[in-house]
Image: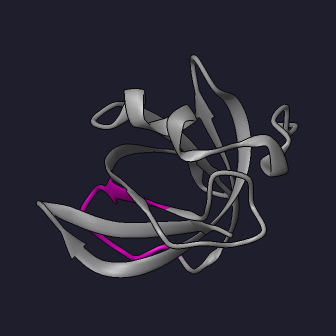
Amino acid sequence: MTSTVDLAKLHIDDFRPHQGAEFEMQTAEGAVALKLAKVEPAGNSGRPRGAFSLLFAGPKGAWLPQAIYPVRHPALGVIEIFLVPIGPLGDGNGYQAIFT
């Protein structure tokens, strides 16, 4: 997968309409379905319109390590996101991405 989205141009309003939607994270073992569970502002930063946080819920099971993963969404395209495991979220594993 090749990144089609410039991370510097993304802002919170790009993700708000997709809260609750499914995203597909590509790993070495294959695709993993993620649900965008929460979209939140994360304070001021050098980013236009401020920093923001995305919380994703993945399936229960072995945790994926923190890393940059290609994440695909039909409306947003492929985004290379640094995801960090944060613990249980809902019925699955939680992962967070922070854009500053």
Residue 66 percent across, percent down from the top left: 60, 79
Identify which residue, 39 or 28, lies in the foreground.
39
Residue 17 percent across, percent down from the top left: 39, 27
Asked if the stretch drawn in magenta spans residue 59, the answer is yes
The residue that appears at 37% across and 81% down in the rendered structure is 86
Q: Which residues are magenta?
A: 53-64
Q: How many numbered marks have been drawn onto this rendered protein structure?
A: 0
The residue that appears at 49% across and 37% down in the rendered structure is 15
Residue 30 to residue 40: above or below: above
- Figure quadrant of the C terminus: bottom right
The colouring scheme, among rainbow, by chain, secondary structure or one colour, is: one colour
Residue 6 percent across, percent down from the top left: 85, 42
Residue 48 percent across, percent down from the top left: 73, 53
Identify which residue, 92 or 5, lies in the foreground.
5
Quadrant hosting residue 77: top right
- Figure quadrant of the N terminus: top right
Left or right of 8: which side holds 36?
left
Residue 27 to residue 65: above or below: above
Asked if the stretch drawn in magenta spans residue 80, the answer is no
Left or right of 66: which side holds 53?
left
Identify which residue, 64 or 100, lies in the foreground.
100
